[in-house]
Structures are given as structure tokens and as C-alpha cells.
Amino acid sequence: MTIEIWDTGVGIPQSQLQEVFEEYHQLDNAARDRSLGLGLGLSIVRRLGVLLDHPVKVSSQFGKGSVFSIEVKQAAGVKTSRNGNMPDIRSKNFNAERPRTILIVEDDSEVRDLLKISLSAEGHQVVTASDGVEALNIIGRDALQPGLVISDFNLPNGMDGLAVAAELRVRLRRSVPVIILTGDISTKTLRDIAVQECEHFNKPASLKELIAAIERLVPAVAFPENASTASVGSAVAMAPVVYVVDDDSDVRWAIRSMLEQDGRLVEDYEDGESFLNAYHPGRNACLLIDANLPGIGGLDLLNRLKSIGHSVPAIMITGQSDVPMAVEAMKAGATDFLEKPIRGIELLAGVKRALESSHDSGKLTEWRKDAADHLACLTHRQRQIMQMVLAGHPSKNIAADLRISQRTVENHRASIMKKAGVRSLPALARLALAATGALITDQSLSTISETLTS
């Protein structure tokens, strides 16, 4: 069955019959007068037709009028699938394994609806808000975890798009990607958008380019095919998260940036108190914590978690060659160490190892075997010196105890580091810990030595 709508208007030139379905396209509004509409109506109609499998067509005779038609399949009743559910009306481009939760903040209802329809057709889960206040209320009320935010720059009620982006990132405790839509191309506006690390799109934005940007900015996360917006938010909440606790905002930003570029979900905190207030046990997580924090220090925080029975694989950030701190961190439950300045490769490898080892015994066994293999080539004297080094004894004292020269001790230390394939004493302590397969206690430094010499 075909439903037709005829008019006796000015008609449409044959060369522009298909262009009228493009967003923001208007034949008689070259000056972009907003009072004459936005040029979104036909674009929305065609997209709805695609979603419902009702083709929309147009024919016209310039100067006499136009005919718009919609083809509808005629049936006695509503056709359902074999399981009795309504048919899937998503577009052919829908990819159930790559949906993203997207929050759209736009005060123009027509633009907002077009974006929602278009992105939903691509398989994304879309939530909309008319201004920043509503967007923040949705985040707080529904515990929404958007993978990306698309916001108009000029918004009502006192918050522009950049203010919304900044506040959302604070509340989500991560640098969620943000796309800012604006017609303002002044140097100041473009600079402010760049400084806040948001993506900039001129209005009217091309949907094709917008969809490509989403693919580039947001890592894919697999969800069930029929996932609702709420269930997608829950699934994101269950994804592995890296907690970063450091009082230096520049360090937090650098670590978060490296991890998010690697596709990790990150929450950052400036001190132990704020982390403990927000922490929810039982989540698949890794804790990256500075040893020297104001208030509750890094070691104290690990001991508190340990005392209440919360086991979170932790990576301690220490000063250079701070062996005593590394050993104390082992006693408190840390499984790995990073020295400042932090190297990106070591950071990503450490986080991956911590997350995998926490729930995969096979990975943990593999790591321990690899550590033991690295230390197997040490001589008896080198193992003896390594034990004393890890106990915090300086080279001068080790030389006196073993009745050898200090130069010989230094040579052995260099050879130990080379054979073990490490660059720092905390890394050597981590390797020894992995080789024993047990956390270091007050007595276990000697256990390390006994294990290595057996």
C-alpha cells in the first residue's frame, strides 16, 4: 500500500530531489533563517522510514508541485517474530557487538531528535537532555555511564557545553570523550574547546563524520543484542576499572590519559579519603596508588582495605629505588610497583598483569614461572647479595658482612639486575615476590632466599 501526499507548491528541481532528504538542507532558505525551520523534517522522516522498513520517495514537477509517498506493507495483523516479540526495526548498519552509550545535550528539539534517531539506527544506546542541568540530573539519578557526550556549545540555564563537559568529567571521575557542536568559530571558542580536550564540530554537523568520530573516540564494548540503556550502563559499570589515587593532578591526568588511550575505564581520586568514600567492593578493578599521599597514605590505605577483607590488586607508585617502601608495600598487599617518572609501557603492562592475575590463576602461574626462570640463572653469591639488598642493607654493610669488597658487591648487583632483566630495585623485589608465589611478610624475605637457593 502506498500513502501519498500531494502539494501544489513551487516544486523541486530534478537535480535536488534527493538532496531535500539531507539534514539542514533547505531550498528556499539560503540565509539560514531559523524562523523558517532547520531543514531536518524530511531527514527525520526518511530515517524513520528506514527504521520501520517503509521507503519514502518523492517526485516533483518544478513550478507545479510535488508528491511524497510512503510504502507500507499491508497485513491483517502485526507481524511478530517466532518468539512472539516485536520485529527488530533497527537499521542494517546496526552492530550489536559494538554499541556505545551516548549522552546528547542539545536544547533544539529537532536537532536532538535527529541525532537520537540517527545514532540509535547505528546501534548506539542514546540518552538525551535539553540542557546541562538535566544532563547532570540524569547522571546522578540513573547512575548513567556514557561512553561519549555530544553537546551543543550554546546551552540555556547558565551552563555552556564546555561547562557541562567539565562537570560531567568530575562527576564520572574520568575524562569521558566529548564532542562540542557549535557555529561559533572564533579563535577563543576553538582554543577553549581544544584546551578542554573536546572534539569540535561545526554546525550543521555531517552525520557521517559524526559517526566516524564516535568510532574513533570510544573503544568498543560488547553488550547483549537486546540490551536496554539501563543494562548497557550496568555493563559499563561492571567493566574492569583502574582506580588512580594521587594528589598530583598532573600525574593523575598523565596516567589517566595513557590508560584511556589503551581502552581502560579510569576513575581518579586526589586522596585516600575520597577513594574510600566512593569505593564499591566486588568490582573487577586495579588500584594504582601513590605511596606518599596526604592524610591516609598509600600503605595505610592498603592496610585498611586488607583489614576489612577487600582484596584489590594494587600497584604502588614509589620514588626512585625506594626499596624499603617497596618491601613495606608488599607486606600491605601490593603486587606491583612503578617508579616515578612512570613509563607508559610499564604502566600498561603492570595494569594488564594485575587485572589478569586477579581472576585468572593460569595467568598468575605463568607470571610466577616467568619470574622464577629469570632468577634461576643467578649464582649462590648473587642470590645471597640479592636477599640482603631486598632487606634494605647498603652495599657497604653487605661487603662487611660477606667479607668482600664494596666494588665486588656493586658488580654483583649490576649482574643481578642484568640477568633478572630489570632496571630498578623495586622491580627486582617484585620479581622475587612473583617467584615465591606468596606475599612478603616479616619472615618471608628469608623465604625468598630459601626458595631461590633450593
Image: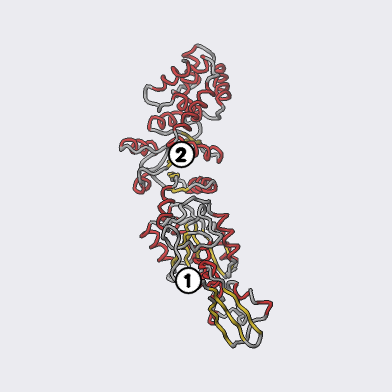
Identified at 52% across, 17% down, the residue is 382
Where residue 388 sits in the image (x, y, percent)?
Answer: 46, 20
Give the vertical position of 225 relative to 91 (above or below). Answer: above
**Residue at disc 1, secondary structure:** loop
The circle on residue 338 is none
Read off the residue under disc 2: 355
Identified at 37% across, 26% down, the residue is 441
Between marks 1 and 2, how big is the CA–CA gap? 54 Å
Where residue 194 sits in the image (x, y, percent)?
Answer: 57, 59
Give the vertical position of 201 relative to 7 (above or below). Answer: above
Amino acid type shown at disc 2: Leu
Asked whether 322 or 379 is in front, the reply is: 379
- Label 2 crowd (10 A; few <14 / some 14-19 / many >=20): many
Q: Is residue 152 visible?
A: no
Q: Earlier in the sequence, mark 1 or mark 2?
A: 1
Q: How is the image coloured?
A: secondary structure
Q: Is residue 227 visible?
A: yes
Q: Which is closer to the viewer, label 1 or label 2?
A: 1
Question: Residue lying farthest right?
Answer: 15
Question: Residue lying farthest left?
Answer: 308
Where residue 438 sits in the image (x, y, percent)?
Answer: 41, 26
- Label 1 crowd (10 A; few <14 / some 14-19 / many >=20): few
Question: Residue lying farthest front?
Answer: 76
**Residue at disc 2, secondary structure:** helix
Question: Residue lying farthest top?
Answer: 403
Where residue 1 sits in the image (x, y, percent)?
Answer: 53, 76
Amino acid type shown at disc 1: Ala
Asked whether 443 or 271 is in front, the reply is: 443
Read off the residue under disc 1: 75
